[in-house]
Amino acid sequence: MKITVDQDACCGSGLCVLRADRVFDQREEDGVVMLLDAAPSPEHHEDVRAAAEGCPTGAIRLAE
């Protein structure tokens, strides 16, 4: 799995961090998503998929 994020599209909802906090974080100044691990281990894939599906702006993209 390869993850990319579009920081310009991010609205700072934080759902990604709630679902996959080992893969995503947020900038303190504006809450925009930060990608901590662009190629997470398989144990995190389910959480990452949930984060991408729940992103209100579609700022998280996955390639399997």
Image (cartoon, grey):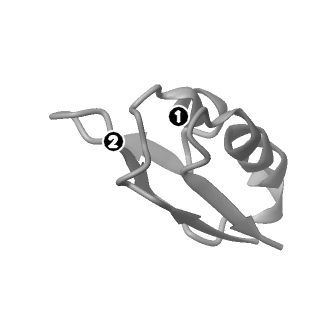
Q: Assign a secondary structure to mark 2.
A: loop
Give coordinates of residue 35: x percent, y percent. Answer: 45, 58
How would you rate the neighbour count of disc 2 (Cα within 10 Å): few for under 14, some for 14-19, many for 20 or more?
A: some
Q: Is residue 11 above or below residue 25?
A: above
Give coordinates of residue 43: x percent, y percent. Answer: 81, 54
Residue 61 numbered tag: none
Estimate the spatial distance between the alpha carbons at disc 2 and disc 1, rounded to whole Å: 11 Å
Q: Is residue 32 left or right of residue 13?
A: left
Give coordinates of residue 31: x percent, y percent. Answer: 30, 33
Name the mark nearer the viewer: 2 or 1: 2
Q: Residue furthest left?
A: 29
Q: Quadrant of residue 55?
A: top right
Give coordinates of residue 62: x percent, y percent. Answer: 72, 64
Q: Assign a secondary structure to mark 1.
A: helix
Q: Is residue 2 above or below residue 5?
A: below
Q: Residue at x 54, y 51 (%)?
A: 59
Q: Is residue 50 left or right of residue 5?
A: right
Q: Quadrant of the C terminus?
A: bottom right
Kindly identify the amino acid type of the residue bearing the numbered disc 1.
Val
Q: Residue at x 61, y 47 (%)?
A: 58
Q: Residue at x 46, y 26 (%)?
A: 13
How would you rate the neighbour count of disc 1 (Cα within 10 Å): few for under 14, some for 14-19, many for 20 or more?
A: many
Q: Quadrant of the N terminus?
A: bottom right
Q: Which residue is mark 1?
A: 17
Q: Which residue is mark 2?
A: 32
Between residues 62 and 19, which one lies in front from this camera angle?
Answer: 62
Q: Is residue 19 left or right of residue 33?
A: right
Q: Is residue 14 above or below residue 37?
A: above
| CB under 8 Å between discs 2 and 1 | no
> Upstream in the sequence, badge 2 or badge 1?
1
Kindly identify the amino acid type of the residue bearing the numbered disc 2.
Val
Q: Residue at x 47, y 28 (%)?
A: 14
